[in-house]
Amino acid sequence: MAILYFIREPQSLHECVSLISWVQFVMGCSGFFQRAGRFVSNKWTRLYSLSFVSLIIYGLSATIYDLLQNEVLLERVLQVDKLVLCIMAMELLLSTLVFLITVISLHSWSQRYVAIYQQLAEIDRRLIGEFGARMNYGKVVRKHIVVLFTVAVLYLGAVNMGLTRLADGHHLEIVVPAALCYIVITGGPHLTGFVHMSLAELLGIRFRLLQQILQPQRLQKPQLENGLRSLIDTVKQLHYLVMEINEVYNVTVWSAMVHDFALSTTELYIIFGRSSDSSSSSAIGDGSYGESPEGGEAMGVMLMAFLSICMLVPFYKMLIGPVYCSNSIEEGRKCLHLLEQLDNWFPGSPGIKELVESIMRWRLQFKINFTSGRSTVYDKTLITEYTSIVCNYLLVLISFAMTQQLGEQVEQQKVALQDWIGI
């Protein structure tokens, strides 16, 4: 990864977020991209996004139709365990619905979305011009490259290899396009979740920078009161940006959470609920294309590996996203606490005392947090709730599967007993 340090250092916020904005635009999840230090958003960018989304959904539908028309692939699909088959159908429908919700929501808020980046860029210019701050944009860009490249390689490899292995290398003209369409449909909301985390991280970085500026030894200079007013306005503006991000991402983050919950629960069920089943090959196939039992077992291992890799992305979002949001809000509270100490650092100044009283009234009026939907606070407590709910539903699914297997065994014993007594 040493090559990352030879990448040209970004000189502005626009260049810093250029990569993720371009990827998000290419995948159809936003109607704008960054070019020449500004964001381009017009009817042609929106037309491209909507056309691309329509093409992807049509492509997935067409490949599924071709799969159902192919007798060999259809026979192989029907050999999948019925519960697993229902899970696969639910995942296709739910992921497509979440993709559409993400596209429609972000396009409807595209102007406010662009305004968030523009306000962040204006705050950066103010911090650099008035307080001599240094913005380490290169570190953020390198992190974006590492995360996107790693996830892309793992996700592309897992989906394509899993579906190709499931089809035993046959009919790749159907399987590969289906895999690519599925990657775009699920990757768009996943990428949007990463962008949401990135925005929270950008706010947290600026809050920490303001904490360094809001130190008594750095505030001893002429025009103190005017400088403090500027700092207070910046802190408020960053908190208002949290509210703007919530408005833009409320529906998107909530729908992604529902999808991640359903995907994690069902995939964990398949992994843990089926891994103990000695006839694991029955969840994939019964040895078509001349497979031996060892081949079926190998395919079972392949399925487990495929699901484990696919689970990394939703787990990363659900476990890391709330941490970034909580840290950002906590850094903002530290800034407000420092502002409330100003009258202690500079006693006898009526102007500063008035500023402190103003910021304290503002803090009581606005209780700002990252949210998902309209009421769910998106913070670290969500990780515990999410883990608890996933484990509970996983136990329910495994209990259901065990009950189903027990019923099948009872029926088999009845048939065997009837054959033995000659009925």
Image (tube, rainbow, N blue to C red):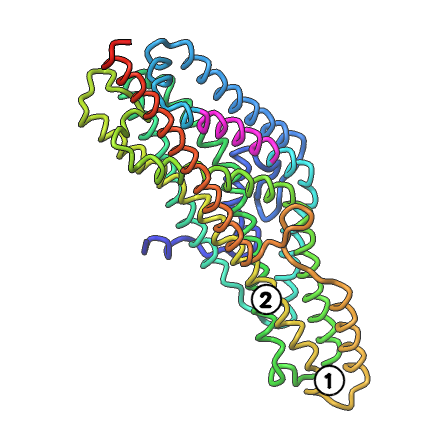
**187 displayed left or right of 38:** left
Query: Where does the C terminus fall, quadrant-wise?
Result: top left
**271 displayed left or right of 39:** left
Residue 384 or 234: which is nearer the viewer?
A: 384
> In the figure, residue 422 lies in which quadrant?
top left
Q: Residue at x 42, y 54 (%)?
A: 142
Does 4 sit above or below residue 233?
A: above
Is any part of residue 11 visible from this angle?
yes
Residue 330 circle label: 2
Disc 1: which residue: 343
Q: Which residue is drawn at 32% across and 16% down?
A: 171
Q: Is residue 22 on the magenta stretch?
A: no
Does 340 sit above or below residue 317?
A: below
**350 displayed left or right of 412:** right
Crowding around mark 1 (Cα neighbors within 10 Å: few <14, some 14 to 19, many 20+) is some
Q: How many labels does the image show?
A: 2
Q: Residue at x 36, y 37 (%)?
A: 273
Residues at discs 2 and 1 in contact (Cβ within 8 Å): no
Residue 256 or 197: which is nearer the viewer?
A: 256
- Residue range of the region highlighted in magenta in the rendering: 86-101
Residue 350, percent from left and from top: 81, 85
- Mark 2 or mark 1, earlier in chain: 2
User: Which amino acid is tagged 1?
Assistant: Asp
Residue 42, percent from left and from top: 67, 34
Predominant SS of the magenta segment: helix
> In the figure, residue 216 lies in which quadrant?
bottom right
User: Which amino acid is tagged 2?
Assistant: Glu
Q: Residue at x 65, y 58 (%)?
A: 369
